[in-house]
Amino acid sequence: MATVSEMNQEMDRQSRGGFGPSTIESRYILEDVPFGLLPTVLLGKISGNSAILHESGIAIFSAAYGRDLKGDNDILPALGFEGMAKADLENLCRKGF
């Protein structure tokens, strides 16, 4: 039996390498962290439900990529979630913007 690494190398040689991302420049990180994890963290802070693992993921991926993935989200500032009170969030959930 070969190691996982050896099996993956053989699959790649046979052009059966799979369908996932082939580089680090993947939307699974570059979109999902700023536009998925970050809003979850902010909503958790507002509602009093911390998302510690999400926060850790943002920090780890930002360090690995050498960039501020939080800063890549250009939508959240326009929505005004930063500093929002829980009552304001509840009102938005009931009545919308």
Image: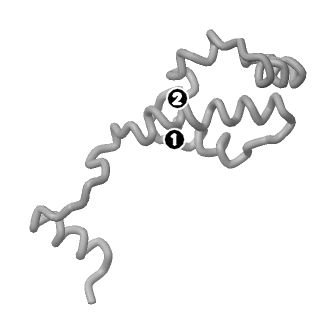
Residue drawn at (59%, 44%), measured in percent from left and top?
A: 57
Q: Position of residue 31 (x, y in %)?
A: 46, 32
Q: Secondary structure at mark 2?
A: loop
Q: Position of residue 21 (x, y in %)?
A: 30, 48
Per the rendering, the mark at residue 40 is: none
Residue drawn at (27%, 90%), measured in percent from left and top?
A: 1
Per the rendering, the mark at residue 61 is: 1
Which residue type carries mark 1?
Phe
Q: Are marks 2 and 1 in contact (CB under 8 Å)?
A: yes
Q: Answer with the quarter of the image where residue 73 lies.
A: top right
Which residue type carries mark 2?
Leu
Alpha carbon of mark 2 to alpha carbon of mark 1: how far?
A: 8 Å
Viewer-proximal residue among 37 and 92: 92
Q: In this figure, which residue is indicated by the disc labeled 2?
A: 69
Q: Residues within 10 Å of mark 2 (few under 14, many from 20)?
A: many
Viewer-proximal residue among 12 and 5: 12
Lower sequence index among marks 2 and 1: 1
- Is 2 on the left or on the right of 44, as rendered? left
